[in-house]
Amino acid sequence: MAETHVLEPVIRKLRMRALLEEDDCAALAALPCTIRTLQPSAYLIREGDRPETGAFLLSGFAFSHKTTGEGARQIVALHLPGDCLDLQNLFLRDADRNVQMIGRAEAAIVALEDMRDLARHRPAIEAALLAESLADLAISREWLLNLGRRDALGRLAHLLCEFALRLEATGCAEQLGYEFPMTQEQVADALGLTPAHVSRTLKALSDRELVRREKRRVYVPDWRPMRGIADFHERYLHLSDRVGNG
Amino acid sequence: MAETHVLEPVIRKLRMRALLEEDDCAALAALPCTIRTLQPSAYLIREGDRPETGAFLLSGFAFSHKTTGEGARQIVALHLPGDCLDLQNLFLRDADRNVQMIGRAEAAIVALEDMRDLARHRPAIEAALLAESLADLAISREWLLNLGRRDALGRLAHLLCEFALRLEATGCAEQLGYEFPMTQEQVADALGLTPAHVSRTLKALSDRELVRREKRRVYVPDWRPMRGIADFHERYLHLSDRVGNG
DNA sequence: CGTACGTTTGATCTTTCTCAATAATGGTGG
DNA sequence: CCACCATTATTGAGAAAGATCAAACGTACG
């Protein structure tokens, strides 16, 4: 460990999920990878691809999305620094979703074959990857609840709560407010709403003084009423309930 | 292998996901487990539990659901024979969803500690579990698209297509129609609709002669128009695109 | 300093919900 | 085998959340 490595945010995240020994971390750090800077809106993966490489997000934000035959878009996941962007294609050949950057971002590109070798020879790392994908699954279940059973105000408030907490967990969070990188159109696509309605709903939140907006930045003076409206309970994020493994 | 084992449907499913050697399968088959018969509506896992055991569904159907603070329910996953019902709690302590039976069902109950040991010592099995959870994630992404961006008719048609295909993949499917085990209330909770609207939407499908209904059974004379309405593309089910591992 | 992109706002329309009443179904005990 | 009861499904009328379409307004960046 000692000095920081480019994959440090990734290793830290995986260590939250499973007990990794020093040599596991060293093996991760030794993974051949190339750093790639991605422009805003750049695609990393497209639906139908059969990628031979995977990626870890080092800085910036990204999202996964799918589209219907009529062209409607649904954002199905948000990715923060430290996230794995490619676990899917480790063991399933065909990509079934697009992965696209939000702002400018950096990613570490690794060969899937190397990742598979690593997983095969280091059960603790494979366990961490499994735990990570189980945590992603838990988030997507909560999103299903959000889309299926909450109204626009609740959905938006929930997204804001989740983003803030995940940001905090990565150590990127600030005091009162935080940079919220998504456009309203992207928010709409994440929440199953139209941009027009997101604008109105955001206005409803600021009218109630639950958020203050300045430029692209969002301030939440008090999270309690926000969590109330969002019906937000952080258990599903599994931020500190690692289990087993040693 | 040779003679059939109680876990045979599970082993067959995992073999679709990763290359398991004979001794991997033998190790799976040797897993101490007890068979439990579950009554209709019985809960296997409740939100907030910290289970020490997991389960494989041997026969019958189940679903996972979550509820909002106001009591609205959202079904976030369907489970068919051969599915793992517990992967989540292998590495994440707290259950964040309920798992409930649909009709009468049988499950094999295993100690999570045994599963973790098995995973630790058999990378191929751990890989299969990882692949299985990635496939579950792919399904839940498609459900997000369904809830967020398709109308009631499309959602219902999509559910019918998915259920039929997954049933077929387990080898439980029949010729023309199949036993659709969910009540309309459960369908409503899976699709983010109300039971009343599910009834109307189902009527719309039968009026167009896309489905024929007899008792609880559903017949689909021709899947093509159904898939059209559903905007159904099976890639996300990853029924035959295993990769890597050997 | 202009142009593309993102946001706000209004008027109107649709889908789906809500509430409620009725009908069918299925399972159970007599 | 039948009668009963609980569960599930159907249908209607009215209400509401959010969509759609369109225009105007900001803002950021080349």
Image (cartoon, coloured by chain):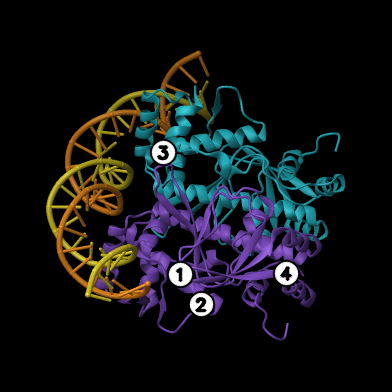
Chain colours: A purple, B cyan, C yellow, D orange
Report the chain holding disc 1. Answer: A
Q: Which mark is residue B177?
A: none
- In terms of depth relative to the viewer, which is nearer, A175 or C23? A175
What is the CA distance from the residue labelled 1 to the residue labelled 2? 19 Å
- Can you see residue A136? yes
Q: Which mark is residue B154?
A: 3
Which three-letter amino acid code belongs to the residue tagged 3?
Answer: Gly
Whole-percent x and y of residue B68?
43, 57
Considering the numbered disc 4 on the image, is that residue within a helix, a strand or a loop? loop
What is the CA distance from the residue labelled 2 to the residue labelled 3? 38 Å
Task: State whether residue B240 is above or below residue A20.
Answer: above
Which three-letter amino acid code belongs to the residue tagged 1?
Answer: Gly
* Residue at 56% from the left image edge and 62% from the top image edge: B48
Q: Which mark is residue A168?
A: 2
What is the CA distance from the residue labelled 2 to the residue labelled 4? 29 Å
What is the CA distance from the residue labelled 3 to the residue labelled 1? 33 Å
Report the chain holding disc 2. Answer: A
Report the chain holding disc 4. Answer: A
What is the CA distance from the residue labelled 1 to the residue labelled 4? 26 Å
Q: Write down the residue under mark 1.
A: A103
Judge if badges 2 and 3 mark residues of a common chain: no
Q: Write down the residue under mark 4.
A: A32
Front disc: 2 or 4: 4
Judge if badges 3 and 1 mark residues of a common chain: no
- Can you see residue B64? no
